[in-house]
Image (spheres, grey):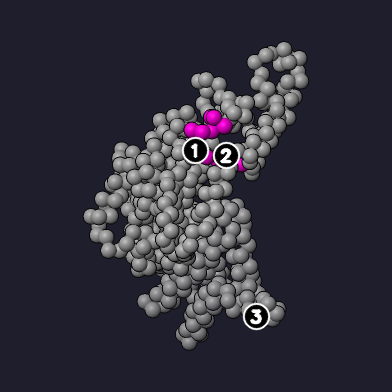
Amino acid sequence: MTGNILFNGRKKRLDYGAVAYVTQEDILLGTLTVKETLIYSAKLRLPGSLNKHQVNEIVDRTIMEMGLQDCAHNLIGNWHSRGISGGEKKRLSIALEILTRPTLLFLDEPTSGLDSAAAFFVIQTLRNMAREANLTIVSSIHQPSSEVFALFDDLFLLSGGETVFFGEAKMALKFFSDAGIPCPSRRNPSDHFLRCINSDFDRVNATLQGSQRLRDRKTISTTHALTSETKAMLVHKYKCSEYATAARTRIQEISSIEGLTFEAQSGSQASWWKQLTTLTKRSFVNMSRDIGYYWLRIVVYLAVSLCVGTVFFNVGTSYHATLARGACAGFISGFMIFMSIGGFPSFIEEMKIFHRERLNGHYGVGVFMLSNFISSIPFLTMMAFVTAIVTYNMVKFQSGFSHITYACLDLLFSIAVVESCMMVIASLVPNFMMGIITGSGFIGIMMMTAGFFRLPPDLPKLFWRYPVSYINSMSWALQVTLYMLALIEQLHKLR
């Protein structure tokens, strides 16, 4: 379904910011409401000169156009909350891309998951936008209803990568009729077209028609049995038709226009600072509302810390307790950091959002990584300080504010490094299971060369000693812990 593009011979610039793409899969942050999702998207892309009232007006207008008023303040929903329906998610995905009124909009099956009434409403809204705003909308669609098909301006019919028809949608019926395959009365035209050109089931139909029971039935359509031949005939007829000639002529006219340029630009008109603050706030809200992102992990950290504290409770400062202290410190430095792999599933979901928004040019890689790290600092600090304070005081490590602060910061930086590594792995290995395996293997290698099982000077110098042990964050964290234990032992000897 398309609108019109007028070429008057003057210089016309088509930039990347004027293009938007709606994927078939609805990729949304389930912890946000419908209106919050649109507001954050508007702030990321609209000019910074717009005030809050103007942004809200644009968002409210878009909500009304897509019929989302009843669920505007409902959560989208994730693994622990039900949220809005699939049809409402589809309309929200479209609403996100029409916020900025792009001049060219691509949609991948926008009616998937919608009932007939919702599908008609969505296509009718897109058609009105195409005509009122003079924008072009290109959509792939499978088996639309007759009412939806009647809304199309132009039709591009493909089968096996070959063009069967391209022209005005209302002329498709005439084309098929002239080819000797008229659409029966009271049948959906799109269903008739698909039956004529879909040759995927030719072998199945041949098998069915070979049975005696179906051979005697006269209701079997010969179109099914000869779909590949019918398609070949239609392709040949189209190549020789006036529709193909008109299409080639139009392409030549467009190609001959001087001054038609394509300039790649960002799809966002917001400043870098505006993007950073908006993404940081959105990410923090997502982390706060998603129970499994950090809150559940904080509870697990607290529970494990209490277990460690009770096992090594007041272990003492004797010579024989040194081994127990070392084991306790090694467990905290190793296993507690290893538990940061629990954030990988949440990183996968955020990476899906990032890929979709970056595909449409909403922001860059740098601002996304920085905003995510900034928003996670409060939660990482909470995990590190809860673990360090509980274990430090229950085990009775060396007292003093500076020492306990040193231990907290050491654990904080170590967890932050592993969290960052998990995000990098999530970007490289977007599959959940493979990502968990890759992340576990990476942390296992880091633990192996950190000094838990073999001292760094004893490691093979080639590769493992230089450079792996020197870039290993766990190695530095363990050295800090061992340094603190050495101080305790020296103090014990002085006493």
Q: Quadrant of residue 465?
A: bottom right
Residue labelled with disc 2: 242
The local crowd at label 2, few if under 14, some if 14 to 19, many if 20 or more residues have their Cα within 10 Å, is: few
Q: At x 60% / y 68%, what residue is drawn?
A: 447
> Which of the labelled discs sits on residue 466, or is there none?
3
Cβ–Cβ under 8 Å for marks 3 and 2:
no
Give the magenta part as a residue range.
Answer: 163-175
Q: Is residue 115 above or below residue 368?
A: above
Q: Depth check: give the residue in front, 439 or 45.
A: 45
Q: Is residue 132 magenta?
A: no
Left or right: residue 42 compared with residue 234 = left
Asked if one can make out residue 188 in the rendered structure from this viewpoint, the answer is yes
Left or right: residue 65 compared with residue 243 = left
Q: Is residue 173 magenta?
A: yes
> Which of the labelled discs sits on residue 168, or is there none?
1
Separation of residues labelled 1 and 3 (CA atoms): 67 Å
Please identify the residue farthest to the top as the structure is shown.
Answer: 216
Asked if one can make out residue 15 in the rendered structure from this viewpoint, the answer is no
Earlier sequence position, callout 1 versus callout 3: 1
Separation of residues labelled 3 and 2 (CA atoms): 71 Å
